[in-house]
Amino acid sequence: MNKLSTEERVRVIAALVEGSSINSTVRMTGISKPTILKLLADLGKACKAFHDEHVVNVAAKRVQCDEIRAFVEMKQKNVPVERKSEFGVGDTWTWTAIDADSKLMISWMVGLRDAGYAHEFIHDVASRLTSRVQLTTDGLKAYLEAVENAFGGDIDYAQLIKLYGPEKAGPGRYSPPQCIGCEEHAISGDPDRAHVSTSYVERANLTMWMGMRRFTRLTNAFSKKVENHAHMVAIFFTYYNWCRIHQSLRVTPAMEAGLTDRLWEIEDLVALID
């Protein structure tokens, strides 16, 4: 297998974090698919380790959490009965937690949308914070016990539950149903109603869809292996936090959060492998 130069690594990663698929990256760069997939795995592991070491002691005040669905290998309805219990086949969820002020992606996790992953994810979020925060999530019930176990009473927590109209049929069936209202539920502490929102984390969902081809719907670019799916998520969020200038902030989220004083280039990102 070829050993890529730094310039070649940068070309590959720049394509992947701007929404190119593996196959289109092969065509654009002339680098073989196995070589690109090895780079994806190596850098994904390095980015996850870097995040765990450096995204700590985050002085956030308001945190928003959400989950975004994708599928791996095949759609959930096509998963054979004998593989229903196999992780990484069918529906796969990415849990995300964003600092509403710095737009830093504090934590993410690829897994299932169940109580076990909710507990693991929320404990990871809590471990990275330095002080009491106001937390907003959607109405997923698994959050309730997870937040209580991770934070106890030291949090101002609210759920924002959106109410939707009927599912669309016909040509518009791929569009989400219309949101017809929201309900705010204070769960613990004293959450400020003016900041009970999931707008920033939902906007980050759009950034994920645009920046990772694996999340694009109605294509054949979906992930074929859950390990590669998780590696790409780790690369993308490290790029998002440290290399990508936020349009509103005019700096990267990591700079706004005080985790670095300089703009990272993709060269810095690929250097994490060495």
Image: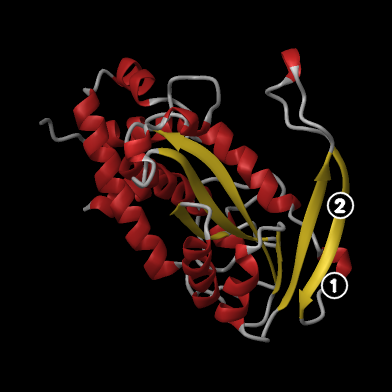
- Mark linked to residue 89: none
Secondary structure of residue under mark 1: loop
Left or right: 92, with 176 as reference point: left
* Percent of width and height locating residue 147: 61, 74
* Percent of width and height locating residue 92: 46, 43
10 Å neighbourhood of mark 1: few (<14), some, or many (≥20)? few
| Residue appearing at x 44%, y 27% in the figure | 78
Q: Nearer the viewer, mark 1 or mark 2?
A: 2
The residue under label 1 is which amino acid type? Asp
Q: Residue furthest left?
A: 1
Left or right: 206, with 177 as reference point: left
10 Å neighbourhood of mark 2: few (<14), some, or many (≥20)? few
Above or below residue 101? Residue 268 is above
Q: Nearer the viewer, residue 241 or 190?
A: 190
**Residue 142 location, quadrant:** bottom right
Quadrant assignment for the N terminus: top left
Residue holding disc 1: 192
The residue under label 2 is which amino acid type? Cys
Question: Label 2 near label 1: C-beta < 8 Å?
Answer: no
Left or right: 24, with 272 as reference point: right
Residue holding disc 2: 182
